[in-house]
Image (cartoon, rainbow, N blue to C red):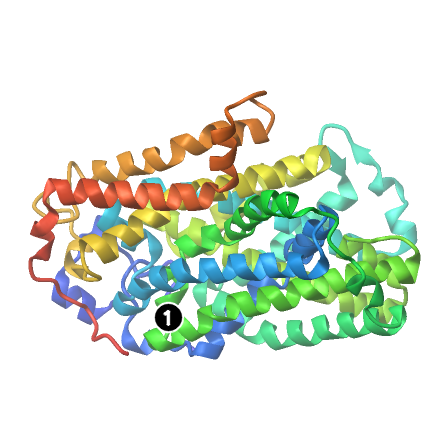
Amino acid sequence: MAIASSSDQPTNNPRFDELFDPDPALTNDDLKPTSSDQRTFSGWEMASLWVGLVVGVPTFYLAGSLVDLGMAWWQGIATVVVANIILLVPLVLTGHPGTKYGVSFPVLARSSFGIRGAHVPTLLRALVGCGWYGIETWIGGEAIFLLLPHFIKHSGWATSVPWLGTSLLEFSCFIAFWLAQLAIVWKGMDGILELEKYSAPILIVLTSCLLIWAYVNAGGFTYMLSLNSRLSSSEFWSLFFPSLTANISFWATLALNIPDFTRYAKSQNDQILGQVGLPIFMGAFTFVGLAVTSSTKVIFGRVISNPIQLLGEIGGFTTMFLAIIGISLATLTTNIAANVVAPANALVNLSPSKFTFRRGALLTALLGIAFQPWRLLKSSESFVYTWLVGYSALLGPIGGIILADYYLVRGGELSVKELYSSSTHGIYYYCGGYNLLAILAMFVGILPVVPGFLQKVGILDGISGSFVVIYNNAWFFSFFTAGFVYWVLSFLKGKQENSRSMDSLLPNKP
């Protein structure tokens, strides 16, 4: 199934080139709008993307971590589901222009941040993607390490090397998983979307098997159902809102670049139905994570929250082999879709003449190694996740600005021609290619969150209680503040000029 061209050799898109004569500095085959025959994804295929994204090691921890903090089992799962229902709104709204115009996130960002200013939000999104890519790859490498025979895992190769920060054996497992991912990424968006599509049913079956194993061996889920709340009413609400923000931040990055995927949807109905899969699958998989983790207390006499460590306790080579295949597949589907597409497209947008999707994905993978995730995770796992989730929350202003620009300023209409034009008279050229109002609004949304973030990572000791509240609700605060400020500034500047005739490259489907 031909979805998108990602080869190094350019291919012609006659309709796009003949109609608009795009600026070569702003386009290549990976940045052009998708044509009608490239929009092949149905609602189920869009939903299967979320199955691949949701089923993974980090998601396994979510509800369990909230129960550890004192919530009842159902409160932990409900918090995750509510957060993802809230996130569903910006996901669908941001995905709309992707389906309507066939444009990716970097191209969409040009309308609000400017032809050149779009590099600011796309590179910010790319940076956190590279960090997560390295960490998820290390998790995949751990699964390979677990599969190795006992005598190899206790050989001299497993001894930590000081200058490297890990053992040569663990590093080799990391590189092996890195190469396996690269083989899929090298096929471009074709390979990525096909992987998500066909992995979904496999992951559902393997997850169901894990749940059944836990139920049978623990004699039911009685222990989990007995996990009542240890919090008073006031304590619950003081924990609920920061937890809600953290769970929203979990997929806040993908909520920005969701047009990278919805541009392949057959229609708006398909992209909306596909997005609805997020809260459903998140709720289901966090239930599995919590049920399996709580069952380990009954089965092994202690709680084993790490699914990779759990696999080592289950025993039986065949069982372990199938389970590790599942962990590896889950990590592949999450990591490639969530952490490769956005950075690769950001690099393509940065220099279309030098970068294709393949080259951007390769650089993303190399940067994932440069982050040295084994050092970060071994030094302070909580710091890494606080940093990355906190950084994701700081991306809230970008989402607010893009949605305010598309819906409130432009009424849901874009000029595809102008998105690929560097003319100084173009409506998205603004001031030297930068929309200063968007950049100002972004900083207005980010700055109040910074003190709380710096305290969270240990750089600041004491801050005002108001900054703590703002950080605990960082995504909400920054998203709505930046969006509102941008809308007001745009209105005051008199953006009615944007009502000039707009053109749509492709007819919109209901």
Residue 217, compared with residue 123, is above or below; it is: below
Residue 354 position, x and y percent, is: 34, 47
Q: Residue at x 71, y 61 (%)?
A: 289
Q: Nearer the viewer, residue 489 or 507?
A: 489
Q: Quadrant of the N terminus?
A: bottom left
Q: Position of residue 20 (x, y in %)?
A: 13, 62
* Outermost residue toward the front in this view: 233
User: Disc 1 residue type?
Assistant: Tyr
Whether residue 144 is visible: no
Image check: 276 left or right of 56? left
x and y percentages locating residue 309 in the rendered image: 81, 53
Instruction: Pick the residue in front: 453 or 11.
Output: 453
Which quarter of the rendering shows the C terminus?
A: bottom left
In this rendering, the answer to whether 69 lies above or below 458 is below
- Judge from the rendering whether residue 473 lies leftward or rightward of residue 425; answer left or right: right
Q: Quadrant of residue 39?
A: bottom left
To which residue does mark 1 refer? Answer: 264
Q: Where, by quadrant of the figure, is residue 455 drawn? A: top right
Query: Residue visible at 41% across and 76% down?
Result: 41
Q: Please, is residue 447 above or below residue 135 in the view?
A: above
Of residues 385 and 471, the one drawn nearer to the viewer in this rendering: 471
Q: Is residue 121 left or right of residue 183?
A: left
SS for dot 1: loop
**Above/below status of 164 relative to 491:** above
Q: Residue at x 36, y 49 (%)?
A: 399
Let me know if residue 147 appears in the view.
yes
Neighbour tally class for label 1: few under 14, some 14-19, many 20 plus, Cα within 10 Å: many
Q: Position of residue 157 (x, y in %)?
A: 83, 42
